[in-house]
């Protein structure tokens, strides 16, 4: 297991360098000029040339990328083109924690609602409860944010008056409830359906029938033999969902006025703020690499068969 983890960690810098190079090349050869975005209508050719020289934009692509990687290794991701005088690290750092808290709350909503609903549908397979859960899950998954967000606002703010309408106060503040529910509902649908299918598949296994034939109580059958094996596919989804915590939720953050990284990424794309875009791409890529590694390590403990093949 240690050798496998080491190999994965050694490949991580290669993957990140590749992602960074692709993003850097798209920024360089894509439409739009960052210097023109900075200067806007005041475009003095001499000033433009001086800014290009100061920021190294007059160098070949590989030279620019080499300088960028050298600075990144020192913790310097550059200075934002849009937000004058602010470093990329400070911009992302102040907003990353907000998006992680919001994403974590949404993930908890998905788990605490999705898994019980999936178990209920599996235990009532073929009955009306099964149909109701799956139909409701599909309905939740089909509703976009711009429909669920106004409905939640009308329900909890306008009609009931129990929740604030916008803003941010942290993980334990009531203002996180509505955004977390809106982000978590599609996850409830996916996890409920996956849990239901996994449990139904495990219930048909011979070792479950053998456990029941021995007279083992139904609760112990589910706890010892069904849930442990049925949760392996769900663990995969949850592990990969951890990577989305750093990518933010553009629509939801914009709708509720949440100062997260999703809104920063959107503003940077429209403003062609290439240092922020590149750093954001590297951050998301690193998150997915680490999430895959966590999932693979988790398999080692959840499924003994995988450990046996190593």
Image (cartoon, rainbow, N blue to C red):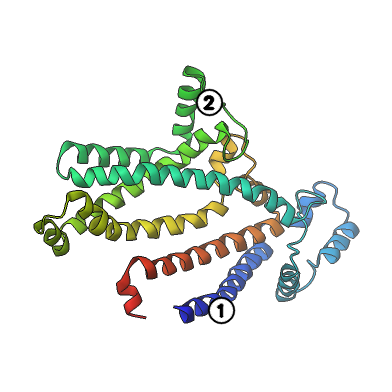
> Seen in the image, is 35 located left or right of residue 3?
right
Relative to 172, residue 32 above or below: below
Q: Which residue is drawn at 15% across and 55% down?
A: 216
Kindly tell me whether residue 198 is visible in this rendering.
no
State the image coordinates of residue 223 (x, y, percent, origin top left): 26, 54
> Seen in the image, is 219 located left or right of residue 278?
left
Q: Residue at x 39, y 56 (%)?
A: 237
Which residue is the site of mark 2? 163
State the image coordinates of residue 272 (x, y, percent, origin top left): 69, 53
State the image coordinates of residue 23 (x, y, percent, origin top left): 62, 65
> Seen in the image, is 273 located left or right of residue 202?
right
Foreground residue among 53 and 66: 66
Relative to 158, residue 239 above or below: below
> Seen in the image, is 49 located left or right of residue 298?
right
Q: Which residue is drawn at 45% across and 23% down?
A: 155
Relative to 104, residue 76 above or below: below
Which residue is the site of mark 1? 10
Q: Residue furthest left?
A: 213
Q: Do the residues labelled 2 and 1 touch (CB within 8 Å)?
A: no
User: How far apart are labels 2 and 1 at the CA level?
Assistant: 47 Å
State the image coordinates of residue 59 (x, y, percent, origin top left): 78, 72
Q: Quadrant of residue 263?
A: top right
Label 1 crowd (10 A; few <14 / some 14-19 / many >=20): few
Label 2 crowd (10 A; few <14 / some 14-19 / many >=20): some
Foreground residue among 122 and 45: 122
Kindly tell me whether residue 39 is visible in this rendering.
yes
Secondary element under disc 2, as helix, strand or loop, is loop
Relative to 227, residue 140 above or below: above
């Amino acid at each position: 297991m240690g050798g496998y983890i080491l190999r994965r960690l050694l490949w991580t810098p290669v993957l990140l360098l590749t992602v960074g190079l692709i993003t850097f090349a798209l920024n360089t050869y894509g439409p739009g000029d960052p210097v023109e975005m900075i200067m806007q209508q005041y475009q003095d050719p001499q000033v433009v040339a001086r800014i290009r020289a100061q920021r190294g934009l007059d160098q070949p692509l590989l030279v620019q990328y080499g300088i960028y990687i050298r600075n990144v290794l020192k913790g310097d991701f550059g200075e934002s083109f849009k937000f004058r005088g602010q470093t990329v690290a400070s911009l992302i750092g102040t907003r990353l924690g907000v998006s992680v808290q919001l994403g974590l709350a949404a993930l908890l909503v998905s788990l605490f609602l999705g898994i019980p609903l999936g178990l209920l549908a599996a235990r009532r397979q073929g009955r009306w409860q099964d149909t109701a859960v799956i139909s409701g899950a599909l309905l939740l998954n089909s509703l976009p944010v711009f429909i669920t967000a106004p409905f939640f606002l009308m329900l909890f703010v306008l009609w009931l008056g129990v929740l604030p309408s916008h803003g941010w106060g942290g993980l334990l503040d009531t203002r996180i409830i509505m955004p977390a529910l809106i982000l978590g509902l599609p996850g409830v649908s996916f996890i409920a359906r996956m849990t239901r299918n996994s449990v139904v598949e495990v219930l048909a296994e011979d070792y479950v029938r053998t456990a029941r034939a021995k007279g083992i109580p139904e609760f112990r059958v589910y706890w010892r033999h069904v849930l442990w094996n049925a949760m392996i596919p769900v663990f995969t989804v949850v592990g990969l969902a951890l990577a989305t915590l750093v990518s933010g939720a553009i629509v939801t953050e914009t709708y509720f006025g949440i100062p997260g990284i999703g809104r920063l990424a959107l503003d940077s794309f429209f403003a062609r703020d290439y240092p922020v875009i590149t750093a954001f791409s590297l951050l998301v890529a690193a998150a997915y690499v680490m999430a895959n590694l966590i999932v693979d390590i988790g398999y080692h403990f959840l499924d003994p068969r995988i450990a046996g093949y190593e």
